[in-house]
Structures are given as structure tokens and as C-alpha cells.
Amino acid sequence: MNRSSQAASLDDSVRHPPALSTGNEYIKRGTPQFMRVTLALFSAGLATFALLYCVQPVLPVLSQEFGVSPATSSLSLSISTGLLALGLLVTGPLSDAIGRKSVMVTALLLAACCTLLSATMTSWHGILLMRALTGLALSGVAAVGMTYLSEEIHPSMVAFSMGLYISGNSIGGMSGRLVTGVITDFSSWRVAIAIIGCFALASALMFWKILPPSRHFRPIPLKPHTLLINFRLHWRDSGLPLLFAEGFLLMGAFVTLFNYIGYRLLAPPWSLSQATVGLLSVVYLTGSWSSPKAGAMTAKYGRATVLLFSTATMATGVLITLFSSIGLILLGMLLFTAGFFAAHAVASGWIGPRARRAKGQASSLYLFSYYLGSSLAGTLGGVFWHHFGWHGITAFIATLLALALLVGIRLRNKQL
């Protein structure tokens, strides 16, 4: 072969690199790369949910300090999840264009900085602004992490690794609530929020250091026309819109319970302390067990069956919280939490294999619906709490879960 033909071949290989498609090139369980990915995504999920939900146990404290109603106080969480949902419509496609790791690292750093700033705000509107920016930044972690796993992990282990990622989310949600709940009782909510922000900064640096670069990522030009074509493709799919609806209903039910359970337990006849209410966040540990367990069970029983069982477990749990015994209330919260994280692990792990193209955008649409449910249902629940107390909250959540069961049945009947 002469020099000119060699140069032509080299140029062609640069412009058209060989596809990495064989199973041997995916990250498999038991390898050092799998451990690095697991630890990195676990820490990112932990930090993301700690930042997002750290205000939830102190909603009654914010109500008192700023003189706002429970529904208005819940905006400090709802505005974050709402902006996160909107941001997903941009950050998912952005990661399809420029890469996964760079988007996630930048997003986590910005969210940590905004959280630190929120601890210094003296006005209610200032807090809402910082919380909105925090949610917007976190959109760059939420969907992209799921997409990274679906691209880089061996297909046979995607459901399992997604479960581990979700377990990091559950522990993050617990840690954020636990730290702010306990420290607020002994110091102040501002100190608690600042500690969460510092932890997130450290997690972002570790994430940047240990996460392996993408090997199967193929950039898609960030063009409005392409985005619109992919958007239509996702919504015309027979299964994806049902999964989007499932995320909306499940997350709406979950956030509603934890937004207002604190108001209930701080009042008579329980009159628990803020620290004790914060300690109840240990129920999130059930999610760190149930999410990878559910992911593994899908191989044996099928996604739809595990999803329906997990949703039914949530419904059972919320009904048990109607009893006045604190032990039964805790049992109900345990079942509810375990069922939620299992159902979310199954539904979110279903997106990557189901999407035909633009998987980042598909994951973004799922999480857009997921966090939109958090914002709308989480705030609307305040109306039910104000007028009907815990019975109203239970009825509202039960309605959402009944709809989620119907969606799950449709998914099973379609045999997707």
C-alpha cells in the first residue's frame, strides 16, 4: 500500500471510527471498572438526593421562621424539583451532544455551590431562588447518570447496576433528611444546609476523579429539528409514554407522604422532636436494599410483574400509616419506601432498553415526568393536608397509586 492510500485509510478511520459494539467492550460485574462506576454513580446519586431533599424535614421550621403556610413552605422543595424537571429537557439532549461525564461533574459542582449560598439567604424569596438554581443544576446529573449506565454497563447487568444507582439515591435522600433534621434541632437549619453543601462538593470531586470516560458514547448534533424528531419518536412509542406516566404518579405519591408526615408527627398526640422526625429518615435504607433487589428480580419475573408488586407494596404502606400507633406508622413508612424505590428502579431501568435512539433524551423525559409529579403533587398535597388532615393525604396518595397500578397493568398487557 502506498503512502497516499495509507493516509486515506488513516483519515477514513479517524472520520469513521469502528463501533464499539461487542459484549467484551462493555463493563462487566466483578471488574475494577465496574467498581469504579458503581462507587462514582452511587456517590453522585447520594449527593444529588441529599441536596434536593435536605429541606424536607425542616419545612415546619421554615414555616415558622418565615411565617408561611405548609403549602408555601413546600415550595422550597417543589421549586427545586420543578426546575430540575424543566432542566432535564435541555441537559439530557446536551449530554447526547457533548458527552456524559463533563455534564454531570459541572452540574454537581454548581448545585453544591448554590446550596451553600442558600444557607446564607435571609429572605424567603432568596431561598427560593437558590433552591430553583440548585434544582436546575441537578438536572445535569439525574438523567445523564441513567444514560451512562445503559450505555457502558453490559446489557445483562444494566438492571442490577441501575438498582445500585437508585440505592445511592435512597441513601442520599435519607442522609439529607437525617442531617438537616438532627442538626437543626441542636444548632440551626442554616448550619445543616451548609454541611450538606460541603459534602456535595467533596462528592463532585471524587466523582470527577474516579468515573471512567465513556466508551460507547456517540455524539448526536444538538439541533432543534433532531430534538423534535426524537421527541416525537419517544411519544409515539407504545411503552415509553406509559413509563413517563408511571414516574409522575410514583414520585408524586412518594414526595407527598414525606412532605407532610413531619407536620403530623410534630403535632399532638405524638409531639415528636425535630431530631426524632429527622431520624425517621432511616426508612430510606429499605430503598438501598429494595432497588437492586427489584432490578435483579426482573430477570426472573419480568419488569411489569415486579413493578406492580412494588406499587401494591406502596399502597399497603400508606394505608398502614392511618393507624395512630407510632410503631405501625413507622412500619407503613418502611413498606411505602421500599416499594417506591423498587418501582422506580424497575421503571427507570426500562427506559434505556426501550428507547430506540437518543437515550439521553428519553431518560430526560422520564425524569421530567418524575420530578413534575414531585412538584405538582407535593404542593397539591398541602391543600389536602390543610382541609382533611392525614386522611386527606392518604386518600390523595392512594388515588395516585391506583392510577399507577392501572398503568402497570397496561404495560404488562402490552408485553413490552
Image (cartoon, rainbow, N blue to C red):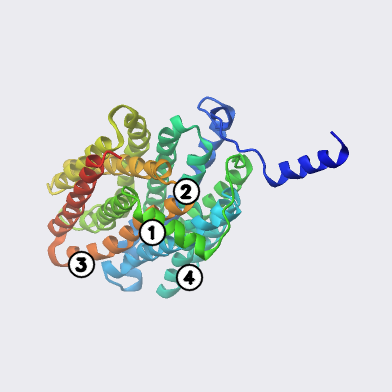
Rendered location of residue 3, percent (x, y): 87, 39
Three-letter amino acid code of the residue under disc 3: Val
According to the picture, the residue beneath numbered tag 3 turns out to be 383
Among the two numbered marks 1 and 2 on one chain, the one whose residue lies closer to the N terminus: 1
Q: Which residue is mark 1?
A: 55
Mark 2 lies on residue: 357
Front residue of 263/301: it is: 301
Q: Which mark is residue 121?
A: 4
Q: Identify the mark nearer the N-term, 2 or 4.
A: 4
**Which comes before the other along the chain, label 1 or label 4?**
1
Q: Can you tell which mark lies on residue 100?
A: none
Query: Left or right of 176: which side holds 213?
Result: right
Give whichever of discs 3 and 1 has the lower sequence position.
Answer: 1
CA distance separating discs 1 and 2: 36 Å
Q: Quadrant of residue 210?
A: top right
For the residues bearing labels 2 and 3, Cβ distance under 8 angstroms = no
- Give the residue type that dot 1 points to: Val
Q: CA distance from mark 3 to mark 4?
A: 27 Å
Badge 4 crowding class, 10 Å Cα cut-off, few under 14, some 14 to 19, many 20 or more, is some
